[in-house]
Image (cartoon, rainbow, N blue to C red):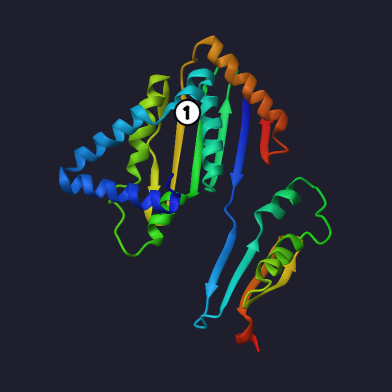
Amino acid sequence: MLNLRMDRRTSDVTIERTENPDELSITARVCPAVEHIRKLSTPLAPNYEWITSVVHETICEDTPWRAEFSNWDPQTGACIQHFVRKEAAK
Amino acid sequence: MISCTEFIPSYSLLFTWLENKVDYDEVVRYWEYLGRISTGKLEAAVKEKGLFGCWEYWKAALNEEAADFVMEIHINEDGTGYLASDMRYCPSMGRLLEYDHFEPHHDYCAHCDVIYPIVLDKYGIRSAPRTLDVQRAACAISLHMDEPPAPEVAAAGWQAALKELENAEAEAITAWVD
């Protein structure tokens, strides 16, 4: 008998809005892409997180918004992605 | 083209509208109609590869839908075996539970119980009763091929299963033979 087992989890991500309309936080506890790469025993590229942080910063260029990226964990892909209005951040 | 964010509530609201307009049996007749006209991909897969066609069909569908699930297939060379699916979070029902501006159809989940067996029964695949936890958008089902299909179908399914075995690691699929 041939047996196959596929276990797929959706990403553990929450999007949070505070009472402040000028900020938005995205908290990823597990990144499915990083999890998949780890399962394959493939080394994660150095600065892998730039695919998120740099893209967000670039999207926000010349807009009233600023993107922040923190709490990166290369083992799980966990991170906090924060968007805030530049004026409100002053 | 309609996005899933609009399709799922529209689908549920159509069931509710049909039931209000006629009755529950009319909703079931609609599901039966869908089972006849909208299962072409599944039917093609099952017709060619038997039970393994179910694995290929739901593997593609559930990954596309980003479902949270575990699926297993245990298949013999003669094509008999079973497939078990444990849906931890159905993206369709899950989305409906997140809405608070309308009530999902009271028996929304039942459409799966009607639509798919119509085509599976034709090819000798028995659906065991499904366990449901609607409020958690969870369910579990198993499909059984109790009698061997035609030899060419069993062979096609077995060859496809062996190929999946070869690629299992790359696809993060656990595989073993016993």
Residue at 38 percent across and 58 percent down: it is B97
Q: Secondary structure at mark 1?
A: helix
Q: Position of residue B125 (x, y in %)?
A: 43, 24
Q: Tell how many labels.
A: 1
Can residue B135 be seen here?
Answer: yes
Extreme residue in the front direction: A62
Q: Position of residue A41 (x, y in %)?
A: 79, 47
The disc numbered 1 marks a residue on which chain?
B
Residue at 39 percent across and 48 percent down: it is B7
Of residue B151 and residue B62, the one placed in the foreground of this image is: B62
Of residue B93 and residue A5, the one placed in the foreground of this image is: B93
Residue at 37 percent across and 36 percent down: it is B129
Residue at 35 percent across and 28 percent down: it is B37
Q: Position of residue A59 (x, y in %)?
A: 66, 66
Q: On the image, numbered disc 1 is attached to which residue?
A: B41
The local crowd at label 1, few if under 14, some if 14 to 19, many if 20 or more residues have their Cα within 10 Å, is: few
Establish if A10 lies above or below A54.
above
Establish if B166 lies above or below A46.
above
- Quarter of the image holding residue B140? top left
**Amino acid bearing label 1:** Lys
